[in-house]
Image: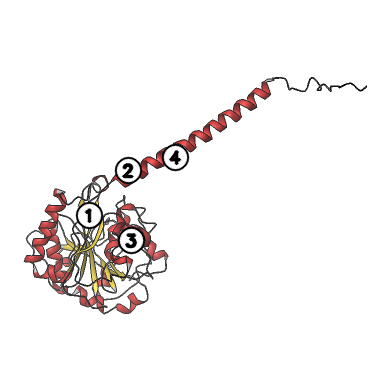
Amino acid sequence: MLQRSYILPIAGTLPRPTLRNLSIWFFKTILWALVLGYFAFSVILSSIHLFEHLGKSRKALRPINRTYNTNNISPLSEMNNEYRFFKMHSESSQLSTDGIFPFYFRAELTPEEDEITVTTLVTKDSYDDLIRLAEAWQGPISAILHVSTETLENDNPNIINVLRTFTNLYKENLVIKRHVDVHMVVGPKNLTRILKPTNIHLNIARFFSRSEFVLFLNQETWPSPMAKYHLKQHKKLLMENDILVLPAFSFTEFANKYDFPSTVDELIQLVQFNVMGMNDQGWPLNKGPTNYEKWINMVIYNVSFGYDSNYQPNFVVKRGSDIPWCTERFDMFDKSKAACLLQMYFNGAENN
């Protein structure tokens, strides 16, 4: 008779607990703990941000009173500005895609295609400068109204006061009403402690200008009555994607008793009397890259020879994409406009 037999397992196969084995086990345990902890933290943080975003009910500013009918079929007509500009300018800063309201005030006159639009920055305290600029230029102006505030609520006192001021300005001043488009930008206070023109402002004003050419004009600078006429005589250079520089002149500190010149002859006479001089920011009068002798002889010359990277004059370019948009990486520095001009120069544009 067969008896049941049993096979015993082989003894002695379990590894001994050595220091190396303990180290490997400890490393794997810590690694898994970190991975699971990071995953849990990411899920919790994403959920918090999601519910915060869904719970916010930010009020939109009053709708824009447009002078044209929008296409009800097109989704772009009803799309929020924040999403629209984020799609068009995905590499731009949040300031230029979030709190921007284009054509908040729209000029009555539509400029001709070959007109030159002046770009400028205006604040709640500098609307007098805008009036002076509009009266001197008598042409299209694309102005950026920058309001320093942290919210976009309808009852925000900063926004209410600024809009009331500019609404009255459009009612009372015919030149402003006819020629000036105002695009409002609302930005956090920590980004706008010192409101000065940056490449963000230049890009927005250029993007919404309604003519073929744009003039980047420095603050506290007003063009002479003949400037627009002379610039239009050289549109061929602009169509070739070159840059036209508009020289700027300023009074010396001892010239308070003199009036602003109205003709080129009066200007030249004041320069000869050392009452005025050609002003390039960062250089003494008549010592900058702009050549006074060639200007006085009415010669269109190339500024590229002896070009300086700090050069930031008033200049005219085409509005379209043939000319690169100003880089916004250096907007916290005083030379952001110089960086914009240098970028155009490296792209092949000649300064004339």
* Residue 135 shows in the view: no
Tell me the distance, in whole angstroms, between the alpha carbons under discs 2 and 3. 22 Å
Would you call the spot at circle 4 few (<14 residues within 10 Å), some (14-19), or many (20 or more)?
few
Tell me the distance, in whole angstroms, between the alpha carbons under discs 1 and 4. 31 Å
Q: Is residue 296 left or right of residue 97?
A: left
Would you call the spot at circle 1 few (<14 residues within 10 Å), some (14-19), or many (20 or more)?
few
Which residue was labeled with disc 1? 60
Q: How is the image coloured?
A: secondary structure
Identified by mark 1, the residue type is Ala
Classify residue 323 by image quadrant. Answer: bottom left
* Residue 207 vertical placement versus 235 (above, below): above
Closest to the observer, 214 or 188: 188
Tell me the distance, in whole angstroms, between the alpha carbons under discs 2 and 1. 18 Å
Q: Which mark is residue 84?
A: 3
* Residue 282 vertical placement versus 303 (above, below): above
Give percent across and percent down for residue 230: 23, 77
Q: Which mark is residue 286?
A: none
Choose mark 1 or mark 3, whichever is in front.
1
Tell me the distance, in whole angstroms, between the alpha carbons under discs 4 and 3. 29 Å
- At horizontal 57% and vertical 32% (from top left) the residue drawn is 31
* Quadrant in the picture for the N terminus: top right
Would you call the spot at circle 3 few (<14 residues within 10 Å), some (14-19), or many (20 or more)?
some
Give percent across and percent down for residue 156: 16, 49
Q: Cβ–Cβ below 8 Å for labels 2 and 1? A: no
Tell me the distance, in whole angstroms, between the alpha carbons under discs 1 and 3. 15 Å
* Residue 276 shows in the view: yes
Which residue was labeled with disc 4? 43
* Quadrant in the picture for the C terminus: bottom left
- At horizontal 26% and vertical 80% (from top left) the residue drawn is 233
Sequence-first disc among 4 and 3:
4
Q: Secondary structure at mark 2?
A: helix
